Amino acid sequence: MTLGSLWRARRVSTVPGSENRLSKAQIESVLVAFSAADWQRANLISRRLCEGVTGWEPSDLLQEALTSFLAENRVWPADLPPLVVLKTAMHSISSNARKHNQASPIDGNVVLDPVALSDDAGVSPIHGRVDATPDATLAAKEQIVAIYAALGGDEELELLVMMWADGVRGTEAMQELGWDAKQYDAARNRLVRRLKAMNPDGGASK
Amino acid sequence: MNKKLSEFDNFIDSLVDELMAMSDDEVLDGENPEAVRGEGLRLLSAAKIQAGKARLAAARSGVAASRSPLASVHAAVSVSDARHFLANARNDSRYTFAARNLGELTDDEVLSLYAKIKSLEGKKTEGHN
């Protein structure tokens, strides 16, 4: 049974209640069934979400997300793909960690900030739908700027990032770009490779 | 395209979708599958230990919690009954509360919300007497 069929098999009624979320044992069984590629997907997502969170490695963020589910501090909806559930949790945790860093007397983000800010702006790499403050908006822009900066001027990749940042992906992005499937897949693989090579705090490491 | 999300949010959502669409070989891109899965399972194991410690800490504070108002709710109503009550209350014009999906609430959050509504009901009843 594939991971996809495993979570789909657990989809049940949409009536609000405990029946449409996974129990601790079910969460564990989903995670134990993760293939190497699933773990790699989770790693790649954690690398992007961990960007600019002082003192956190991507694996710390992923582990924290796993812990929050196993400690039943967070609900795992049964009707969502596991990677989407993990992404949402990691996004929330990283956003909170940035707020914590911001509240700390020592602003550990200063060194890691990849984009120059005005003198009085402070440094607050917060992003995400969790928090739509001006600081969060600025931080989200910084993270996108860091991604563009890591592309080394590869125009194809810049176009692809532009599409994804606009919420256009898959076949729709391929058609808008006027690419065939082979060109799209090659660019996507190259982009993922670049993202993997980025330091968690921004710029390209390799 | 979702205009409400930032470009970064859109990018991350796209990345997740695309990673799920990519083949396992493309995602692994030459990495050793056993090593990658082993590291994932190590994180899972560490998370289980950490979660166990958190539960132990929670159990230790159980005595204090048992004196809280929520504890009396625990004793008075089951979680499923509280969820059922809230699901009905959401469609009842006498109650207005945030339209967060009840399925997303933890058991404690459900019981806490139930307790608050019941408490308000009690005050309202007292006010009428």
Image: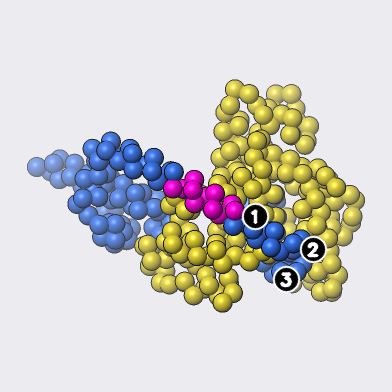
Chain colours: A yellow, B blue
Q: Are marks 1 and 2 on the same chain?
A: yes
Which label was assigned to residue B23? 3
Query: Would you name the residue on which mark 2 appears?
Result: B30
Residue B30 image position (x, y, % from top left): 79, 63
Q: Are marks 2 and 3 on the same chain?
A: yes
Residue at left offset 26%, top offset 47%: B115
Give the Cα distance between marks 1 and 3: 20 Å
Give the Cα distance between marks 2 and 3: 13 Å
Q: Vertical placement of A77 versus B47: above or below?
A: below
State the image quarter where residue B3 is shown.
bottom right
Say left or right for B116 vs A26: left
Does the magenta portion include B51? yes
Q: Is residue B96 visible?
A: no
> Is disc 3 placed on a helix, strand or loop?
loop
Dot 1 or dot 2, earlier in sequence: 2
Residue at left offset 33%, top offset 37%: B61
Query: Would you name the residue on which mark 1 appears?
Result: B39
Crowding near the residue tagged with mark 2, few <14, some 14–19, many ≥20 C-alpha atoms within 10 Å: few
User: Taken as a whole, is the magenta stretch helix, strand or loop?
Assistant: helix
The range drawn in magenta is B42-52
Does the magenta portion include B41? no
Crowding near the residue tagged with mark 1, few <14, some 14–19, many ≥20 C-alpha atoms within 10 Å: some
| Marked residue chain, label 3 | B
Say left or right for A76 vs A58: left
Residue B101 image position (x, y, % from top left): 42, 58
